[in-house]
Image (spheres, rainbow, N blue to C red):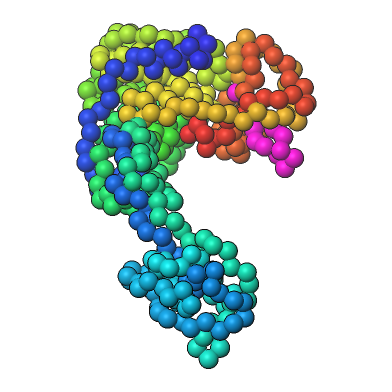
Amino acid sequence: MILDEAINFILQTIESHPDSEIVPIEKSCGRFLAETLSSHDDIPPFDNSQVDGYAVNSKYIKLNSPVTISQRIPAGSNPKELDRSTTARIFTGAVVPKGSDAVVMQEQVDIENGRALFKKMIFPGQFIRRKGCDLKKNQIFFQKGRLLSAADIGMCASVGLKSLRVFKKLKIGVFSSGDELRQPGEKLLDGQIYDSNRPMVLSLARTLGLDTLDMGCLPDDLNQTIKLLANASKKVDVLLTCGGVSVGEEDHIKSAVENLGSIKLWKIKIKPGKPFAFGYVGKTVFMGMPGNPVSAWVTFALICRPYIIKRAGGSDLSINPLYLECNFDWNKPNDRKEFLRGKINKDGKLEIFKNQNSQILSSICFSEGLIEIPTKTTVSKGDKLHYYPFSMIV
């Protein structure tokens, strides 16, 4: 199955979202919003000064002529109406008084004998933040399903919200697999390697505001794998595994899932990442990623992530890649869509990491995005290709 078809197939299996809960705004960052939000007032609720300076009526100010300072307006105070022949000392964020139409920054004003001298042309409206310039009353500003950022929390606070209704966190369980794996900190014996996939995938999942459970490492034993998957499926909403879904004699996960439930999709025409599986362990969703670390990273980013976002209540699955010239040749046409690791160079062109092997995790660490090579395509310098910055997909 091709990538787009596989993603659409997996997304169409989603029938429900988690329940919602109300949490304080300071604990809402990284959560999916479960309600649409609108402003109950104009933001800001009044015209206010952008700078420390002097409020004036620009029609009645003559340059370099002394003007009486009639009042002082700190932020949070309620000013009197400005006498048009005077000026008011005003501070950033303070209410602009009636009768004024501009604010002059203090650097452009001289004070002589307690009176103000204006040195530059004054334009109506300058340095005034108008009422409602950020949000209008009753304006919808966040839609249900938004993944809330730190700036979003600030916006919610600015309209007076102290709590938000968000979707409860999905529980994601992550297994690695293989008798050759040891945990970081343990001593390696001959033929053994450290388990990099499980901590990597757990970290990727946590960026989506999920509850993650470290399920450990599945052994190369079918009966034990069946037992461990069955037990784990009772504790989580989604099970993710790394390795064990290919066609090797020691790849038991696919058989174990079929014993406990069903495999609905197996193998996707992408490189890296072909041996990807989707199905169910009982009623729990199962997604099996390849064992090579780059393949696991790529399949999580391109396939698991959109499923998890939508299942968790998220609404924005859009990815709008850049379309840029490349500075490399690629003479390896493939019947699978290929995703090379690379970055934008100083000339604004795409360049690739020197080693594109799916076992080379440094190709992710020292790159900044994925470069898409269409199926059965050769590439020459100067060709344009789609580029997915990592910030867009993880």
Q: Is residue 149 left or right of residue 298?
A: left
Tell me the chief SS of the magenta region: strand
- Give the quarter of the image for residue 236: top left
Q: Is residue 133 left or right of residue 371?
A: left
- Give the quarter of the image for residue 348: top right
Q: Is residue 31 visible?
A: no
Q: Is residue 348 left or right of residue 250?
A: right
Q: State the residue lying farthest toward the right.
A: 381
Image vertical order of residue 55 relative to residue 144, above or below? below
Q: Horizontal and vertical percent for residue 116?
A: 53, 82
- Give the quarter of the image for residue 181: top left
In this rendered view, identify the residue nearer to me: 271 or 323: 323
Q: Horizontal and vertical percent for residue 29?
A: 35, 45
Could you tell me which residue is drawn at 56 percent across and 20 percent down? 272
Could you tell me which residue is drawn at 28 percent across and 52 percent down? 160
Image vertical order of residue 186 relative to residue 88, above or below? above
Q: State the residue lying farthest toward the bottom.
A: 113
In this rendered view, identify the residue nearer to me: 20 or 361: 20
The question of residue 314 being in magenta is answered with no
The question of residue 348 being in magenta is answered with yes
Could you tell me which residue is drawn at 34 percent across and 53 percent down? 158
Could you tell me which residue is drawn at 37 percent across and 71 percent down? 81
Looking at the rendering, the stretch of residues picked out in magenta corresponds to: 339-351
Image vertical order of residue 12 relative to residue 308, above or below? above
Q: Is residue 386 visible?
A: yes
Q: Horizontal and vertical percent for residue 247?
A: 47, 9
Q: Horizontal and vertical percent for residue 39?
A: 32, 45
Instruction: Say how many tags the image has.
Output: 0
